[in-house]
Amino acid sequence: MILVESVKEAMDSVLSFTKSAEELLRRKKVYRELIFKYLANEGVIMPSTSEKHALIKKTLELWSSRQTTKPQGQTGNNQDEKRTETDSTEVKTDPDFDLQILGQQFCQWFFGLLNSQNPAQSQGPQDWGPEHFWPDAKLNLLARVSGEQMEEFVGADVVSSRLVALTREERLLFQPNLEGHGLKGLSSPHGLVLVAVAGTIHRDSSCLGIFEQIFGLIKSPVNNTWKIKFANLKIRGQDAITDKDVSAPALTYNSSDLQLICSGN
């Protein structure tokens, strides 16, 4: 038996008997939920049904990409790292861009950024603010929990503040389903791109319900990035859903519904 007197000694002891990062992650004591939460903190959103081996693979890919992209000896600073994370929202507006890929990239960025504001997250909050929204942005929030409550907000500052309150004050975490029927994209001739996504809502280790969110995005001509023109968020509590809804959250909006929303904005 190896006796240790501190957390650091315990960590050093474990690492001394570990041959590789993959071996460490595969240990029984390294739970699937722990890896899942780590990836979410790093802005890597995985399907809620992902098995441990898939989470391990994604973690190793993340670590490998950091080793290859960061020049040797470069330490950088926190501000530069935050700026890099924020700049990852840039999606070049190639006329042939894939709406599904754009939707995945946007949701990974947005929910990673929003979830980072939750005080329970080990990672520090990333740069959140009204700069990610158009000045006249709108938010419609429909919550069906113990009853039905509808809220509407107008203006970048107000919309930004209400959304961040969901994670910063109410301590919610959003887990989008970026596969199958959980994600849809649509574009209009006048430049509006619609991204619709479904997912689960959590607080700590409890699943509270599911959500559907529709984003209206318009490209900024200044820096070629997408900014939020409007967002419709619908939340349903546990009483209004089934186990199937939670295991694979799917959009209830069909293509015709999204087309109507797109043409009306």
Image (tube, rainbow, N blue to C red):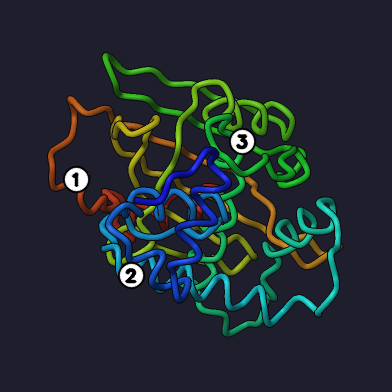
Residue type for callout 3 = Gln
Q: Residue at x 29, y 56 (%)?
A: 254
Q: Residue at x 39, y 31 (%)?
A: 204
Mark 3 crowd level (few <14, some 14–19, many ≥20, 10 Å Cα):
many
Mark 1 crowd level (few <14, some 14–19, many ≥20, 10 Å Cα):
some
Q: For mark 1, what is the residue? A: 245
Do tag 1 and tag 3 residues touch (Cβ < 8 Å)?
Answer: no
The image position of residue 173, as x and y in percent, is 45, 37
Residue type for callout 1 = Asp
Residue 14 visible in the displayed image:
yes
Q: Is residue 13 left or right of residue 27?
A: right
Residue 111 visible in the displayed image:
no
Could you give the CA–CA distance between mark 1 and mark 3, rounded to whole angstroms?
A: 26 Å
Residue type for callout 2 = Ala
Q: For mark 3, what is the residue? A: 117
Tell me the tag on residue 54: 2
Count of all numbered marks drawn on residues in the image: 3
Return the disc, 2 or 3, that comes first in the chain's sequence.
Answer: 2
Q: Secondary structure at mark 3?
A: loop
Tell me the tag on residue 166: none
